[in-house]
Amino acid sequence: MKRLLCIISAMNTGGAETFLMKLYRKLDRANFQMDFCVNAPEKGFYDEEIASMGGRIYCIPCKSSDLSGFRRQLTNVVRENRYDYVLRITASGAGLMDLKLAKKAGASVCVARSSNSGSDGGLKSFLAHRIGRLLYSRYIDVRIAPSDLAAIYTFGRRAYQRGEVRILHNALDPAVYHYDPTARARIRDAFDIPQDAFVVGHIGRFSQQKNHTFLLEAFASVHRMHPEAILMLVGDGELRPEVTRQVERLHLSDCVRFCGVRSDVPALLSAMDVFAFPSFYEGMPNTIIEAQATGLPCVLADTITKEADITGLLTYLPLGDAARWASEIAGKCTCVRRDTSEELKAAGYDINEVCKEFVQMIFGEDA
């Protein structure tokens, strides 16, 4: 059996982690296995499922707080368990240092998968990214990205133009992701949402990147146009208290639902009428692909790659004009859902086919 060690901060519900789990579930685990090296001491959202499928989870120190411990323990994990295949999920060139450690510890195939197309870490983070990309790119055997923008940001324009980066779509299982009117009614009942309400939805970590502040400004205008409108916020994160306070300041407490971290994403998407996504940057957002799979119209920032528009259900807008966003969102209230499964499959977003590509990219053989 061939085992792939995936280095990632934690196995929670972020886009990169969720995509890894979609692949993992489809993997032929009689021949291939995925293990995970994390640095979050608390239990991850997917940890139990990983263990149930035979995966191992190693917890090592965080690089930012204990660099020497991180180096030592990552080296030991790779060397002592004889990992030939190592995958690093990162948007920053600084994260590529881990592949240098893995290579020196004996890994023969080191893979870097870009997870984003930007950073909100400021000048220091940007410099670390550029320097890391320069110093550690030689330790990468396979470069993977979910979009052209993510490929260029993480690996550089020259590497992208030379064809050194392979695009692997953030695919999904069409048997799971589709519009379900029964689930729509159930979710609305669970969150005390009237069946005839106009529901605006958002799924994402409560972080600066996701731009909840602007989303709430836009929704406040939507609510003035449609007093029955409800906003569903799915996820959690460090900025949730701040978002909660903004909801209270805008007098929206009665019409905003904080849904928390959940695994029933297709049902949640079915309960929504329009998806709003004003992120400052993204690699290739899983949630936008998932929303399209349920036939849900989306209004999103023009900072996000146009590659995400597979079905014609996306409307791109510049950030800054909340009133314009509100008008566009409100205009979706009469949209009728449609089946988009064939469009997604034709565009290469079927997880069954993408898993085969993944196995070939990493292990060099058919799934």
Image (cartoon, rainbow, N blue to C red):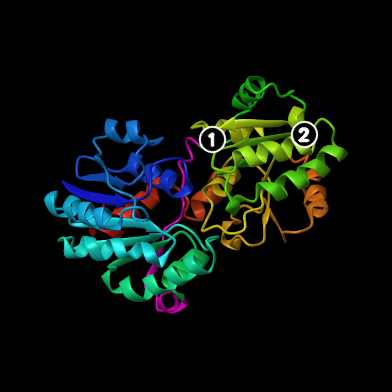
The x and y percentages for residue 281 are: 58, 59
In the visual, does 71 lie left or right of 49?
Answer: left
Asked if the stretch drawn in magenta spans residue 47, the answer is no
Which residue position is annotated with label 2?
A: 252
Q: Earlier in the sequence, mark 1 or mark 2?
A: 2
Image-quadrant location for residue 239: top right
Q: Nearer the viewer, residue 121 or 319?
A: 121
The x and y percentages for residue 333 are: 78, 39
In the visual, does 151 lie left or right of 197?
Answer: left
The x and y percentages for residue 65 are: 35, 53
Per the image, label 2 sits on a secondary structure element best described as: loop
Query: What amino acid does circle 1 point to?
Result: Val
Q: What is the magenta range? A: 157-176
Q: Determine the CA span between mark 1 and mark 2.
A: 24 Å
The x and y percentages for residue 156 are: 44, 74
In the visual, does 215 lie left or right of 292?
Answer: right
Which residue position is annotated with label 1?
A: 265
